[in-house]
Amino acid sequence: MKTLLNKILKECRPYIKQGRLASYIPELLKADKKEFGICVVSADSMDFAGDYDKKFTMQSVIKPLILLMALMDNGEEPVRQLVGVESTGKPFDAFNYSDLALKREHINPMINTGAIALCSLIKGIDYRKRFDRLLELTRKLSGNPELEVDEQVYASEKLTGNKNRALAYMLKAYGMLEDNVEDVLDCYFRGCSIKASAVDLANIALVFANGGIDVKTGEYMFDKKYARYVNAVLMTCGMYDGSGEFALNVGVPAKSGVGGGIMAVVPGRMGIGLYSPALDSKGNSIAGIKALELLSRELDLSIF
Ligand code: GLU
């Protein structure tokens, strides 16, 4: 496996130059485009290559965990009432809704509007506490108690995140968000700024791949029906408006983030974490997607 992973990184590295670092969060421009790492973990093995231990901010890879926490705290019904599950076919931060009113059918948990709305379903006496619980869950699923927020990225996003502010106020305008917008956004921005490595993402993915059980320890983390919920939404909406292509070419539930990370869930088999910060026009790691295509072909990973 290690030889295969090294070979894949070598073959996919040339794609990096076709990609660009995310620039709308200024701090993300400091990433090193050349970095490229992968980790594959299953019940009894872990293999990695390249910059597998390099830390980057999770960005949208936190969205499946926001969804999971909302499900664990409330059950399925309140989550379904607030946010739909249809893919939008639009960019993750789009606000060009054509109908007169914003409705749940317009949003899903993997676009910014949906993830911001779902932060309001996380339980806690205040939004700082809600974020602390989200961080705790992320640490638990990754098996890494040291995960922390990248304070520079957090500050950078909070300062410049006016599009997300607009989306949150739109939720409020249409009665889909009761709480204080800045408080809700603070939880969302902090979540996006959690620093993790490809190894951390692979470990989180493995729990989703095994229906909420940590196969390495046998510990029950969450209900299997929530793993199904999250995996299904990842399959149709996880890779931005490139989710259809990804379903065809890779064929597993996955989530990418503008920090360059991808977390891929291979149900019943393995968790995969990838990092390469140069992005394609949709916001997906360009070399990361190519690597997953090759890996899927080599190991016959597609669930279809
Ligand atoms: N923090 C980013 C934002 O809200 C996350 C976007 C992403 O990774 O897709 O714009």
Image (cartoon, rainbow, N blue to C red):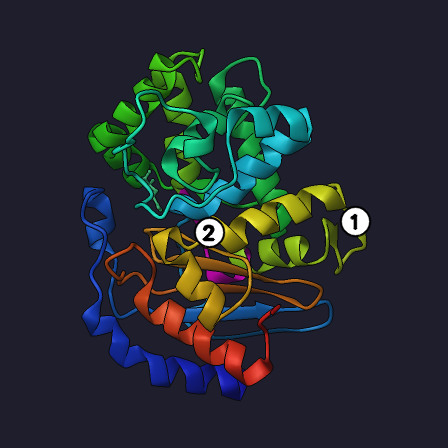
Q: Does the residue tagged 2 have its C-beta within 8 Å of any atom of ligand 1?
A: no
Residue 283 in the figure: left or right of residue 87: left
Q: Quadrant of the N terminus?
A: bottom right
Mark 2 and mark 1 in contact? Answer it, CB < 8 Å.
no
Q: Is residue 292 above or below residue 187?
A: below
Is residue 199 highlighted in magenta? yes
Question: Quick one: which residue is furthest to the front in this view?
Answer: 99
Image quarter for ligand 1: top left
Type of amino acid under label 2: Gly
Query: Residue 278: which quarter of the image?
Result: bottom left
Residue 38 in the figure: left or right of residue 77: left
Q: Is residue 126 above or below residue 239?
A: above
Residue 50 in the figure: left or right of residue 45: left
Who's the residue at 54% across and 84% down the image?
298
Who's the residue at 73% across and 52% down the image?
211
Q: Residues within 10 Å of mark 2 (few under 14, many from 20)?
A: many
- Which one is closest to the eye, mark 2 or mark 1? 2
Question: Quick one: which residue is furthest to the right in this view?
Answer: 218
Q: Quadrant of the C terminus?
A: bottom right
Q: Is residue 287 above or below residue 171?
A: below
* Label 2 vs 1, first from the N-terminus: 1
Question: Considering depth in this image, is 90 or 128 the residue closer to the camera?
Answer: 90
Measure the C-alpha gap from mark 2 to mark 1. 26 Å
Who's the residue at 45% across and 72% down the image?
249
Label disc, if present, on residue 238 of the rendered structure:
2
Query: Residue 122: which quarter of the image?
Result: top right
| Residue corresponding to mark 1 | 219
Q: Which residues are magenta?
A: 194-200
| Element type where label 2 sits in the image | loop
Residue 60: x and y in percent read: 41, 45
Residue 227: x and y in percent read: 67, 47
